[in-house]
Image (cartoon, rainbow, N blue to C red):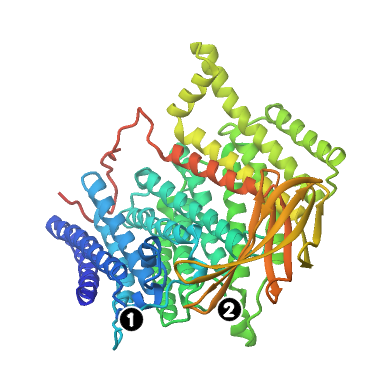
Amino acid sequence: MPHIGYVAVTLAMVLALYATVVALVGAKRRQPELVASARNAAFGVAALLTLAVIILETLLLTGHFQTKYVYETSNHAAPLFFLITALWGSQNGSLLFWSWLMSMFGALVLFQKWGSMRQMMPYVIAVIQFNLAFFTMLVVFVANPFEQLNFFPPDGTGMNPLLRHFGMIIHPPMLYLGFTAFVIPYAFAIAALVTRQTNDVWIRTTRRWTLTAWLFLSIGLVLGGWWAYDVLGWGGYWGWDPVENSSLIPWLVATPFLHSVMMQENRGMLKRWNMALIILTYSLMLNGTFLTRAGMIASVHTFAQSAIGPLFLIFIALMFSLSLYLFISRWDDLKSENELDSFFSRESFFMFNNLIFVGLAVIVWWGTHFPLFSEAFTGEAIVVGPPFFEKTTAPLWAAVLLLMGVTPLIPWRRASLKKLGDTLIWPTVVGLAVIALLYFAANIKIWGALIGFGLCAFTLTATLIEYWRGVSARHRSRGESYPVALWTLIQRNRRRYGGYMVHIGVILVAIGIIGSRFYQVETQQNLAVGESMTIASDLIGTYELTYQGLREGQSPDDRLITEAVLSVNFNGQPAGEIVPIREFFVVQQQPMTIPDKRSTLADDLYVILAGWEGTGETATFKAYINPLVNWIWVGGVVFILGTLIAAWPNPTESTQRSAAPVKVRGATAAVK
């Protein structure tokens, strides 16, 4: 069976190369039958990779430990859920999984758009299948998950203990779904450049693909932070790790793209921006994959260093160079149809939004890659730590919050200063009132926190005003109750009001970050049984933890589990128990620290068992108070719901939008 899987991937690689060449030849020669053959080959690639994935999963479920990948990622004691998710638990399997996802997205878009996008389709096929040819080549020649050992082990070594967490198990496929789905808007962008169809057809065609890819990437980022907070035991959720950053950077470029395309749809503007942003998004996605898989920068997330790195660099350089060449050669075709009418207009503020997000991406990219540059020029890899990222990005994040509040309230084309002032008066009053209230009543004296909370209040007020305008207008004109008016408003303009819900989610996330970043409290103490430690926050209150002793046991999957029991008092009142854990994985000979938390919307009490002596007569604990941290996860849920609403078709919208035939100069193929 492993040999069948390997042959399936090899045939998929050959078919992907065939589809790439035949699609381009068919377009060049205007032979629709060749392009149709390329489409059929693309379906064949998806089918073959589906077979390969099924075979690898079967090997995992049946414990075929002679397969090296199965031996390294599973064992008899592993629960069924971990056997299923081991498919993407290591380098080789995850590359196969990645290739399969991309092939399925490619097949789906061909099925959806074949009848309506005939001129672009040859180039869409070529771009997607060329990418698939590269990834399947890696699987065939460098990272073969079907490789066999020369003996049959009785058991495997099992999954990396750090990955045995629901958030981390779901986190990688969410990122993979996001990354691979971005190949669709990228492929249509390249096709638009080649065929000179640089109007908004390609943007409208791929809008939901882009939103879907961005949604999956966003979910992956939130889950990654949750995993780091729940498992790594350092009291934080984002450490500016290179691999964390490698997922954030494409998101930072894709986000302005989602906003900027509205300018092209509504006003025929920012065509160059949009094309550049989607090319950069996909290139940075490849760059992030390179960082994760090459193992060239130290990270808790990276795979071991391998021969994949140089191959990825070559592929990234090739794809970016071809994209850049097309972009420059079509520069005149991408000229805006309208110019900016006024500095004070929604168009201008979309431009500012683009600049700020690209600035954030540049800063994070530079800091992430600095160890590579420093090692190349000085021989020493100098790692840039969290203080660099926090200090350099904080002003730009503040500007993002401000623009989120201002931009929706500004009209298109031109706004007078008086009208702008009238529009912003209430958000400004609320923002300043929140700053004053926090300063005088809540004893918050850190100006960074005050400004951050004030901006959150400003933007939340502005966003709610937008909802209120729409709801009150429907209430007056149609006599609908306010709840019905709100529901109908969202139903009829999901893109707009779903987007505002995303903004509310971002505000809630920002509140959680500001509170936990500026007001985190930590302490570490060694306690004997019966002794207590105290940790206090001026904002939250005082916790007293009393050590009750250790409990030891063994799980069915051979984990040795040590639990430390502490009773908790909060502000003098009993508040239950908290039980941090230390696990020891016998097969891997690897310990793992699992913190325990007492969670409320106000704060988390976060406790780690750092160590103990003897049978637990004394133990060392590290405790944190993280104010408002759970608003990050609440905001993440609101953010995701808003994106789903924005991506969902409006009732009045047809299920499939057909692009009207566009007469363009230089179109090279028409497939019948």
Residue drawn 43% across the image and 61% down it: 282
Q: Callout 1: helix, strand or loop?
A: loop
Q: Mark 1 or 2 closer to N-term?
A: 1
Q: Is residue 197 above or below residue 231?
A: above
Badge 1 amino acid: Pro
Residue closest to the eye, 397 or 607: 607
Residue drawn 25% across the image and 55% down it: 107
Q: Is residue 153 above or below residue 546?
A: below
Badge 2 amino acid: Leu
Residue closest to the eye, 558 or 358: 558
Q: CA distance from mark 1 to mark 2?
A: 42 Å
Horizontal and vertical percent position of residue 608: 67, 64
Residue topped by disc 1: 154
Residue closest to the eye, 161 or 116: 161
Horizontal and vertical percent position of residue 644: 44, 41
* Mark 1: few/some/many CA within 10 Å (<14, 14-19, 20+): few
| Figure disc tally | 2
Q: Is residue 399 visible?
A: no
Q: Are marks 1 and 2 in contact (CB under 8 Å)?
A: no
Residue drawn 20% across the image and 68% down it: 15
Q: Which mark is residue 249?
A: none
Q: Callout 2: helix, strand or loop?
A: helix
Horizontal and vertical percent position of residue 505: 58, 42
Residue topped by disc 2: 372
Horizontal and vertical percent position of residue 391: 73, 61
Q: Is residue 78 visible?
A: yes
Q: Name which quarter of the figure residue 320 lies in.
A: bottom left
